[in-house]
Image: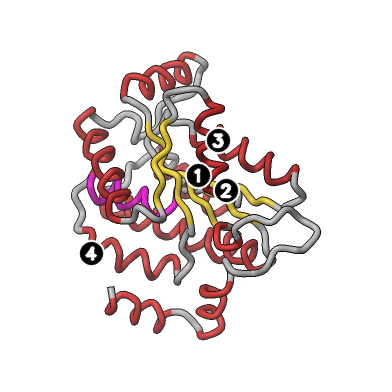
Amino acid sequence: MGTTQQTSKTLCSSASLRLCVKNNLAPEPSNRQTVKPSNRFLTFEGEEGTGKSTHIRLLAARLRSLGHEVVTTREPGGTPLCEAIRGLLQYDSCGEAPVPAAETLLFCASRAQLVENVIRPALKRGAWVLSDRFYDSTYAYQGYGRGFDLAKLRSIMEFAICGVRPSLTFLLDADPDTENARLADRFAAGQAADRFEREAAEFHARVREGFRRLAEEEPDRIRIIRTDGPIEAAQAAIWSAVAP
């Protein structure tokens, strides 16, 4: 990691690096409920059908009810350019599917844009940022799923994020039957399956294993939350990690 960090420092300006260090540590205003200041950038990971959007919405509502500014975003997406990239990646909006290497680089391009235009400014002003996916998804889907070398992916990722990392990640996990049932409900309601949802079961098994390995490597940052039970139980587990 030392070589990767040196590369990142070379690519980022000194002012940008200072923001990378400080953006998660701004003090909370005294008139708001005290919350852990280092937890302002939260990411939600997991396969489709695990409830990421639901739990982001619920947590955002709870934080806002306490007077906090909350920015919710998603990957790929979150800005006009990133949403255009989302169309390319998930729905072949240009009429041509990206090859695996192009797919990986497009995800990183979207992430770089999102970091500089949305995440970093929000953290600088003391807002909470809740993101539906971040770089752990690239490691799981493109690393474990597609088989790309993780060390190379980390080097590319450092270039894209320039030091901005989530302080806490919730890995939402449900059994495959539950996930598939939830996806079937979406498709029955008229939502089209994207490129990743159409992948074979073997691909999703590799992705699932990848997420679990990432959680084993960083247990302090990545918290596994079971979401195949009551929503209230999962939300209570998430809130206990966020609240003092």
Going from N to C along the chain, the mark reached first, 3 or 1, is 1
Q: Amino acid at mark 3?
A: Ala
Q: CA distance from mark 1 to mark 4?
A: 24 Å
Mark 3 or 2: in front is 3
Q: Amino acid at mark 2?
A: Thr
Q: CA distance from mark 1 to mark 2?
A: 6 Å
Q: Which of 138 and 129 lies nearest the eye of the viewer?
A: 129
Q: Answer yes or no: do the residues labelled 1 and 4 have beta carbons within 8 Å?
A: no
Going from N to C along the chain, the mark reached first, 1 or 2, is 2
Q: CA distance from mark 3 to mark 4?
A: 35 Å
- As drawn, the label of residue 151 is 4
In the displayed structure, 160 sits above or below 50; it is below
Q: Answer yes or no: do the residues labelled 3 and 4 have beta carbons within 8 Å?
A: no
Q: Secondary structure at mark 4?
A: helix
The residue carrying mark 2 is 73
Q: CA distance from mark 3 to mark 2?
A: 22 Å
Residue segment shown in magenta = 134-144
Going from N to C along the chain, the mark reached first, 2 or 4, is 2
- As drawn, the label of residue 236 is 3
* Pointer 2 local density, CA inside 10 Å: few below 14, some 14–19, many at least 20: many
Residue at the front extreme, as displayed: 244
Residue 92, x across and y down, in percent: 39, 39
Q: For this view, does 231 lie left or right of residue 225?
A: right
The overriding secondary structure of the stretch rendered in magenta is helix
Q: Is residue 27 magenta?
A: no
Q: For this view, does 93 lie left or right of residue 98?
A: right
